[in-house]
Amino acid sequence: MYMDKPKTTPSGKPYDIHERLLLFACDVVGAAQFLHTRGPIARALSYQILTSGTSVGSNAEEGDGASSHRDFIAKMRIALKEAKEVRFRLRVCRRRELLDARFDALIQEADEVVRILGKIVHVALRRERA
């Protein structure tokens, strides 16, 4: 059986937000594994990064199964909050050189995820008010 390749943006990222958040979570796991090798402070931060970074996608998945439009907005707001949290902690780790330049693309992806989820929440709120 022929399977279509997932559709991607010009930069190679999946258009499907859930697929993109799954890849993001996998990259966060890799960053957490790397941080475990960098000492006790990095290890402590790795747990926080792992929790918030994997929570983004799971909350977005829950949003798809929301019982109402308001529930969808609530779940997506939580996903956005978690995305902002992981972005901040990744930036701290990079600035303190706990993460090296290999992780710059992950930090950029965290920023893009924040923007995408922010737009989803904004549009959903606008529709709720209409």
Image: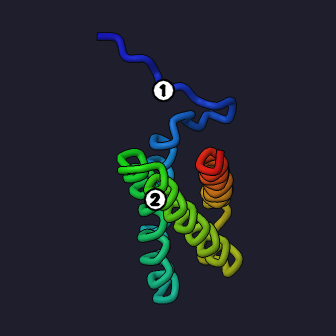
Marks 1 and 2 sit apart, C-alpha to C-alpha, by 25 Å
Mark positioned earlier in the residue sequence (1 or 2): 1
The mark tally for this picture is 2
Please tell me which residue is depicted at 61% across the width and 67% down the height of the picture: 84
Residue type, mark 1 in image:
Pro
Please tell me which residue is depicted at 59% across the width and 75% down the height of the picture: 89
Alpha-carbon neighbours of circle 1 within 10 Å: few (<14), some, or many (≥20)? few
Alpha-carbon neighbours of circle 2 within 10 Å: few (<14), some, or many (≥20)? many
Color style of the picture = rainbow
Residue type, mark 2 in image:
Lys
Q: In the image, 118: left or right of 29?
A: right
Query: Residue placed farthest to the bottom in the image?
Result: 40
Q: Can residue 63 be seen at all in this image of the molecule?
A: yes
To which quarter of the image does residue 102 belong?
bottom right
Q: In the image, 7: left or right of 22?
A: right
Q: Nearer the viewer, mark 1 or mark 2?
A: 2
Q: Can residue 102 be seen at all in this image of the molecule?
A: no
Give the camera-side residue of 10 and 62: 62
Q: Residue under circle 1?
A: 6
Give the camera-side residue of 58 and 64: 64
Please tell me which residue is depicted at 64% across the width and 31% down the height of the picture: 9
Give the secondary structure at mark 1.
Answer: loop
Quarter of the image for the N terminus: give it. Answer: top left
Quarter of the image for the C terminus: give it. Answer: top right
Q: Residue 92: x and y, percent?
A: 65, 78
Q: Residue under circle 2?
A: 75
